[in-house]
Amino acid sequence: MSLIARNCRDITRLILQREDRTLSLVERLAVRFHLRICLMCTRFTGQVQLMNRAMGQWKQYAAEPDESAPDDGTGAGSGH
């Protein structure tokens, strides 16, 4: 297999791995080249980015205190 020419399975694996580690130069070039010619992997990349943004927003939401819950001083909510 060529260092640059990869199939969709290889590229989607690399797209997911770049969330956890820095890809090598050859891997980054392979992804970039493949995304120029493959609409489906380009869409997959967009979906991964969308999920990452949604998770970031969820983490912010989950970290905010719930101001709608009444505070009875016990920290346990109203119990209803």
Image: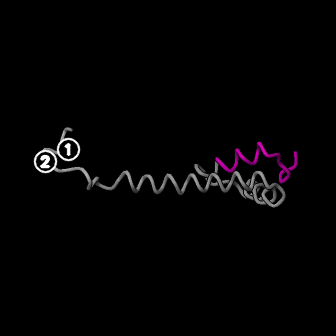
Residue at (82, 54) in percent of width and height: 38
Residue 52, percent across and down? 55, 54
In the displayed structure, does residue 20 sit left or right of residue 32?
left
Residue at (79, 46) in percent of width and height: 8
Which numbered marker is on residue 46?
none
**Mark 1 secondary-structure assignment:** loop
Q: What colour scheme governs how the chains and residues are painted in the rendered image of this protein?
A: one colour
In the rendered image, the quadrant that contains the N terminus is top right
Residue 65, percent across and down? 28, 54
In the rendered image, the quadrant that contains the C terminus is top left
- Sooner in the amino-acid sequence: mark 2 or mark 1: 2
C-alpha gap between disc 2 and disc 1: 6 Å
State the residue position of label 2.
72
State the extent of the magenta-drawn residues as a range: 1-16
Q: Nearer the viewer, residue 17 or 57?
A: 57
Residue 11, percent across and down? 75, 48
Are the two marked residues, 2 and 1, in contact with CB atoms closer than 8 angstroms? yes
Q: Nearer the viewer, residue 61 or 30?
A: 61
Q: As displayed, is residue 59 above or below residue 10?
A: below
Q: Of all residues shown, which one is farthest toward the left?
A: 73
**Mark 2 secondary-structure assignment:** loop
Residue at (19, 50) in percent of width and height: 70
Q: Nearer the viewer, residue 3 or 68?
A: 68
Q: Of all residues shown, which one is farthest toward the top?
A: 79
Q: Residues within 10 Å of mark 1 (few under 14, many from 20)?
A: few
Residue 76: name its quadrant: top left
State the residue position of label 1.
77
Q: Amino acid at mark 1?
A: Gly
Q: Amino acid at mark 2?
A: Asp
Residue 60, percent across and down? 40, 56
